[in-house]
Image (tube, rainbow, N blue to C red):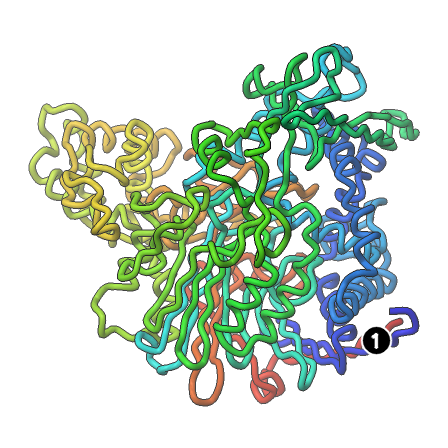
Amino acid sequence: MVGHGYRAEIRRTSYGIPHVLAADLGSVAFGQGWAYAEDRLCDLADQVVKVRGERSRWLGAGPGDQYLASDVGYRAIGLVEMARQALPTLTRDSRSMIEGYAAGFNQYLAGVGPRGVRGWCAGQPWVGPVSPVDLLAYQQDLALVSSGRVVLPSIAMAQPAGAGVKADLRVPATSVADAVRSLFADRNTTAALGSNGWAIGGQRSASGGGALLANPHFPWQGELKLWESHLTVPGVLDVYGAAVGGLPGVQIGFNQKVAWTHTVAQGPRFTFARYRLVPGQPTSYYIGDRVLRMRAKTVTVPVKGADGRLGEVIRTTWFGEHGPVVDLSSIDPSFGWTLTSAIEFRDANAGNFRLLDFWLAMARSGSVAEVAAQNARFGTPWLNTLAADSAGTTWFGDAASTPNLTPEATAAWLASPIGLLDGSDPRHGWREEPGAPAPGLLPASRWPQLTREDYVFNANNSPWIANPRQPIENFPPQLGRQRSVLSARARLNALRLEDPGWSQRFTLDGLTSAVLSDESLSALSLLEPVRRLCDLHAGSAEAGWVDAVKACAVLDDWDGRFRVDSRGAVLWREVMSKVLALHPDALDAAGPLFSSAFDPDEPVHTPGSPRPDPAVLGPALDGAARTLEAAGFPLDVPLGMVQHSVKGGRDFPVPGAPDALGALDVVEYSPMPATTLEPVVPGDRVLSADGYPVNTGTSMLLAVQFTGSGPRAKGLLTFSQSDDPASPNFADQQVLFAQGKVRNCLYTQAEILTDPQLRTTTVRGA
């Protein structure tokens, strides 16, 4: 706020974790913003340029006009304009924190200058100060991760039928289609951004108090990289955990009484609605008997030309009653803007400025009952919540912003491959009910939620199974399937929670080892049956088995895990990949791997009765062996010689396995892990001479347990805390991850002050 003098102590302990101590919320956020800028300034600076719609100004239109399409889209939906209007309406605490964070970020940048920035953007001309409005606009952008972000090119391209093709924006149809398809490729499968989350109650915790396991699977590059910190305002706030850069506070973490985590929820955060147009008037449409006119919004985008000079692109975008008109003709010509119809996109998170207040309320909660109440009050943008408290109670809730559809709209949504509603039918509107976080969203009374004293979990599966002993039923169908097969990863989560029996009580080490043991459902279920097949068929004349003796010997010696020193893990991954390429549901249905079908009364143990088909496994073994040989790897190559991450030009071995194999410790590669300008590590999802590069997956591991003397925690940030290649914290946790180790999370003042790596910096600003 104007005239506020900020002062914060930043006490960095081992692995570079900042513990920020201040006298008020504005100052603690100032210290957090300063410390984040020291570690990761580039990621936030880049995103601010993006939401301002200024990438073309600095970088030109971009390959395939991608920067220009992004700029047109962001200027059309007007995040900065909305943030400017919303800032004065924020609660006092939220405004104090967002203003303090921006001031701290800017104070650090002013001290080092753009050329002194540590990281991939050093010296870039677009690096500059940020404002509270910028941060609030970016907060809105984060709310749109599972919705509006993805359709920006479709908004930019939408033009009335008969208007002619303008040459000022040429985005390849495949780029538009690929972006939109990511929203609805399969609306009930695991989200691209994944997580495992466990909340353990007093009945299953070794301490008798609650415990938590947080294991988000987020990108290792770009704006969604998590960052760890501890914020303390005596008597007001004392919270430890991880956050996304630019969003003050902690989004996954714990305080003295409560620990919580989030997983990406399955349901939709949007709807598409097709309007019937008035004949001869392509920008007028019907809703029932009413005729409405679309609203035109013209945006002007500065664009850097090949000669370095700035030009302008002026583009008109169009809006219906509830959101922008989109052009989806790249996925189906009937979904384009025709002479008779147009499609509107309505976003459940449009105007969602509740994020700051929500996570501040979570950080101050004293029980899971309070956590549930804050979820009901604010909702989440696209996340489930799991929480445990010191009294030993747990809670799960799908509080994600979800359209509250009428029965008619629900039926249409379920019947359409893209969830398309009839926008001209008033029965297909969003219903408004009391108790919803915002008008048109599902109220908390209709959310799937569960309170237990033993445990709740989620692995991006339908909320139907948060605990197999008490399935949740009769929730709106758009939130996920009921009485339907769980993913392999979800089943392994449930197995580890149930096995070896009801009497097991989890310790901190037991929680972290659930992930770092690097097991997979595919190997746990099928390795022994495949070994028996090898004994019977290897060397025989049957298809694929003639040359299988060596491969079978490797699998016979494999430890069944995906650790960096595991020999046989690469071969197994390739075998399973070959099977799943031909039989995509092989781990989820009776078929070439399991003989018994899914049983909704036994969701954790079915499909079951492993009985791999030798006619399928033989060719898969043979194909896998040939793939390794073609890539130049021996069949028994250690996983860490093949699977690796690259940071600062250095290779680091990486444990874990792809989600499809049913691993908890998920590691994968994405050619586009985020919307960042940060150069993406080159690679592919298939095995080559470069091995398996990794840039997404297990991004954080946090285990918390409440004891009689307070919370105890262990954790790991797999890609490390700092982006500064000269920092000792640039890759120190990559080394821990490869070793299957975690570190202590220091929470008490005594732990912080006695840490041998403690270094304290006092920062001030206005």
Q: Nearer the viewer, residue 5 or 334?
A: 334
Could you tell me which quadrant the C terminus lies in? bottom right
Q: Residue at x 78, y 35 (%)?
A: 76
Image coordinates of residue 502 in percent, x first then y, are 22, 70
Image coordinates of residue 373 in percent, x first then y, are 54, 68
The quarter of the picture where residue 346 lies is top right
Could you tell me which quadrant the N terminus lies in? bottom right
Image coordinates of residue 197 in percent, x first then y, are 43, 60
Q: Which residue is mark 1?
A: 6
**Mark 1 residue type:** Tyr
The quarter of the picture where residue 325 lies is top right
Q: Nearer the viewer, residue 296 or 305?
A: 296
Q: Nearer the viewer, residue 111 or 598?
A: 598
Is 701 displayed left or right of 524 in the figure? Answer: right
In the image, residue 403 above or below residue 665: above
Q: Residue at x 53, y 75 (%)?
A: 745
Q: Residue at x 70, y 27 (%)?
A: 290
Q: Residue at x 43, y 69 (%)?
A: 212
Image coordinates of residue 329 in percent, x first then y, are 60, 19
In the image, residue 597 above or below residue 465: above
Q: Nearer the viewer, residue 678 or 123?
A: 678
The quarter of the picture where residue 305 lies is top right
In the image, residue 497 above or below residue 255: above
